[in-house]
Image: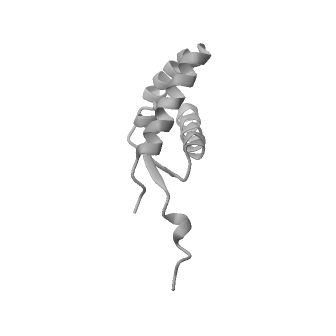
Amino acid sequence: MFKHDKNFNDMKTMTCKQLGGACDTAFHANSFDEMAEISKKHGMEMFQKGDKAHLESMNEMKELMKTPDTMKTWFETKRKEFEALPEDR
Ligand SMILES: [Zn+2]
């Protein structure tokens, strides 16, 4: 009867650390692109707060981004990790 909760079934969870960040904050998203957006926002927030651990992980990401191929490979690896995750319940 109440099937309207379908849309909430395909959420997946990844942590900041899993996405190249520095803390255990968990993000929930329907797609990897959404996940990447949320994680980026979180990173920017922490950056603005001057969080040292996040500053360091962001610098590492910047190094990655200098090489488009490396960045692409990293992104694809994370995307596969996301796809392989079980959905939240
Ligand atoms: Zn974090």
Question: In the image, is 88 to the left or to the right of 3?
Answer: left
Depth check: 52 or 19 in front?
A: 19
* Residue depicted at x 49% and y 19%: 60
Q: Quadrant of residue 4?
A: bottom right
Depth check: 81 or 66 in front?
A: 81
- Give the color scheme: rainbow, by chain, secondary structure or one colour: one colour
Q: Position of residue 41 (x, y in %)?
A: 59, 40
Residue furthest to the bottom in view is: 1
Q: Is residue 73 above or below residue 40?
A: above
Q: Is residue 56 above or below residue 76?
A: above
Q: Position of residue 30 (x, y in %)?
A: 55, 53
Q: Quadrant of residue 43?
A: top right
Depth check: 74 or 27 in front?
A: 74
The quadrant of the picture occupied by the C terminus is bottom left
* Residue depicted at x 42% and y 44%: 84
* Residue depicted at x 59% and y 35%: 44
> Exactly how many numbered labels are in the figure?
0
* Residue depicted at x 45% and y 32%: 21
Q: Position of residue 79 (x, y in %)?
A: 51, 37
Question: In the image, is 80 to the left or to the right of 68?
Answer: left
Q: Position of residue 55 (x, y in %)?
A: 50, 25
Q: Is residue 1 above or below residue 64?
A: below
